[in-house]
Amino acid sequence: MGTCLRLRSCGAARLLRPRPGPAPARRAAGGPAGLSPALLRTDSFVGGRWLPAAAGTFPVLDPASGAALGSVADCGAPEARAAVRAAHEAFCSWRGVSAKERSSLLRKWYELMMQNKDDLAKIITAESGKPLKEAQGEILYSANFLEWFSEEARRVYGDIISTPAKERRALVLKQPVGVAAVITPWNFPSAMITRKVGAALAAGCTVVVKPAEDTPFSALALAQLANQAGIPPGVYNVIPCSRTKASEVGEVLCTDPLVSKISFTGSTVTGKVLLRHAASTVKRVSMELGGLAPFIVFDSANVDQAVAGAMASKFRNAGQTCVCANRFLVQRGIHDSFVKKFAEAIQKSLRVGNGFEEGTTQGPLINEKAVEKVEKHVSDAISKGATVVTGGKRHPCGRNFFEPTLMSNVTGDMLCSHEETFGPLAPVIKFDTEEEAIAIANATDVGLAGYFYSQDPAQIWRVAEQLEVGMVGVNEGLISSVECPFGGVKQSGLGREGSKYGTDEYLEVKYVCYGGL
């Protein structure tokens, strides 16, 4: 549990208040056309103040055009330590704020997000490239986490335990762990923050957020609204940094003794590095890491429903989500019909283009490295006998665009069968029996989400119980909800986010034995 004695006594501590500082906070000069200058912040946000970084700034690029959206403070180890200290000082008082007051502040933050939802969505589209309609959906999803945890803040309950000794009483208290370091990805630059931060603040923790270098503007816009909502200084801090500084900042956050909790969403490789760092001070850790989601279609399935679910699961955000279907396993009796209808749906329903353009369903990938990975998976599969049904190459919209691609005759030795593609590639593997499908689906060291379509009740129970994943969609391609626990098994992570279980990740359980009664 976080202690406040390292810097000052909790009894003497007060929440940080804005101190006289440098000139007013910088905003992106003029701001890209259509983006709100009031929300487009460029400095770090620490202790209730907008602060530049000593090392200068780094550029943030529009993945659709490659044009610069603006330059953001490039924080390093000194700024990270300062943010941790600010969060720690604030924790000494924030932990004592009543649950009702924390609830009210989170609710106000939610309301401000809803009032600014269109401007926030435009920022997401500008920096991540996802279609505006999807970005608008993300903002609603993101805001709903603040609403949900504003309600959960008042539901952190302890216990009273009956003891064998008449003169004793046993109590269980739940208390905030302390400062939480939150490291988030670029693919959901708003929702991945509120899913973590909402739970942390509801529990009584303070946070330091390191957003992805590709998408820092969303985190800074949330800081602006948190400040307006009255979230006290030091409770929510944001330290953006470039890719070159990410390693040193991550190490500081994971090793600083004033940090009690690490919450990370990203790749399994990076998660393992952060786990090694966090082990040195035995921090509480929750990780939402990579996946390799199977999407199984059994002979009993409704093909049209399965195709609709496949479209929703695979091509949301151009395939750049951790719960996207990565491997399509289709039973022999229904295989040809499914592939035909899936191809028709792709060709008819998907439109590649700039996320701000009307009718766009598929924006760019986040950068050229992401495109190269999709190309590598496609070329590897072709070289080993797979067939391109539709798509298969870069799209003429620009260097970061790739055609929605469907491949058949895919086998288990191909890269797309055992590596997460994170792009608009749908590889189809034919199978014969239920046992074979389960074996293929589980033959991986990760297990985040899995999907299957079947109309056989007995089969539904069998498969749902046997899939080695943390979340299962049965006849459903979209499973995320603020009310439900999100997380994986195996090397897909530790802990759960969202739902009533989300606050538990930021709470310590304390047993109190009261004797002499």
Image: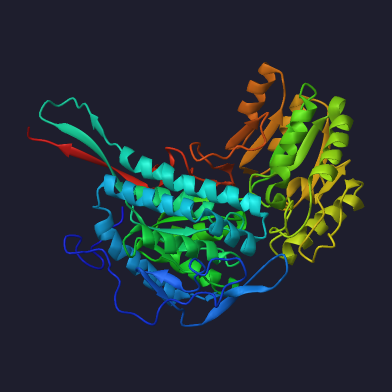
Name the image quarter holding the C terminus: top left
Position in image of residue 479 (x %, y %): 60, 37
Name which residue lies at 32% across and 51% down. 204
Is residue 368 visible to us here?
yes
Residue 291 placed where, x, y %?
65, 46
Q: Is residue 64 left or right of residue 7?
A: right
Instruction: Give coordinates of residue 115: x percent, y percent.
Output: 47, 53
Q: Identify whether 147 is placed above or below 163.
A: below
Q: Residue 297 location, x and y as percent?
A: 76, 30
Q: Is residue 147 left or right of residue 353?
A: left
Q: Residue at x 67, y 56 (%)?
A: 130
Q: Is residue 81 above or below residue 5?
A: below
Residue 288 shows in the view: no
Front residue of 372/172: it is 372
* Nearer-the-camera pick, 263 or 32: 32
Q: Tell me which residue sits at (75%, 31%) in the image.
A: 306
Picture colour scheme: rainbow
Q: Is residue 43 above or below residue 431?
A: below
| Of the pair 257 and 105, the residue shown nearer to us | 105
Q: Residue at x 12, y 25 (%)?
A: 166
